[in-house]
Amino acid sequence: MTWQVLVHGPLARLDERVSRALVDTVPRPLSELGADLGNLTVALPVLGCAMAYAVWRSRRIAALYAGLAMALVPLLVIPLKEWTARPGPLEPWAQGYYPSGHTATAVVAYFGAAFLVSKRLVPVAAVLTAVTGAGLVLRGYHWPLDVLASLCLGVLILAVSSTCTRRSSG
């Protein structure tokens, strides 16, 4: 995906056509609400509460790695945004839209919280993350590939965090 964005290949061009067809197909307040779920002010407190719960349940290592996973999000997303310098769907003069930091934040915060509290919350995390990504695309804040790349990045971060937690706990 990154390669296609960098060279403006056929996948990136398809991505832009799909985005243009999707933007504003739902009322803006609804897509805005979905997009806002990826804000740090929304997602970070959810993860913070789950980390506090994990510490209370004597799962300090798991809480630590969940926090480190969230700290990795801007450390990985910001350089990628700078490197790709992709313009936005509604703001072609602005750059830094690929990958979506809001989506990566949602993936790591909501799935991280679910893993810390109860695996039964994983479907809730999936819905919150999907609503975030859909809101970002439907509102025109991100191209679909921006969101998809961040989903992949978030899953990778969570996989590393989970592996580190298991190794440290086992």
Image: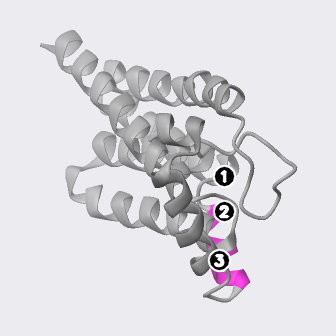
Task: Identify which residue, 63 or 25, lies in the foreground.
Answer: 25
Q: Classify 10 Å Cα crowding around label 1: few (below 14), some (14-19), many (20 and above).
A: some
Quadrant for the C terminus in the image: top left
Query: What distance separates the C-alpha of mark 2 from that of mark 1?
Result: 5 Å
| Residue at left offset 58%, top offset 45% | 8
- Identify which amino acid the numbered label 3 is placed on: Val
SS at mark 3?
loop
Asked if the residue at tag 1 contacts the one at tag 2, i.e. Cβ–Cβ closer than 8 Å, the answer is yes
Q: Say which residue label 2 marks.
A: 36
Which label was assigned to residue 23? Answer: 3
- Identify which amino acid the numbered label 1 is placed on: Asn
- Residue 89: x and y in percent read 71, 61
Confirm whether residue 101 shows in the render. Answer: yes
- Identify which amino acid the numbered label 2 is placed on: Asp
Task: Identify which residue, 81 or 127, lies in the foreground.
Answer: 81
Closer to the camera: disc 3 or disc 2? 3
The residue segment tinted magenta is 28-36
| Side (left or right) of 52 relative to 165 | right
SS at mark 1?
loop
Task: Identify which residue, 74 or 10, lies in the foreground.
Answer: 10
Query: What distance separates the C-alpha of mark 3 from that of mark 2?
Result: 16 Å
Q: Who comes first in sequence, dot 3 or dot 1?
A: 3
| Coloring scheme used | one colour
Q: Say which residue label 1 marks.
A: 39
Asked if the residue at tag 2 contacts the one at tag 3, i.e. Cβ–Cβ closer than 8 Å, the answer is no
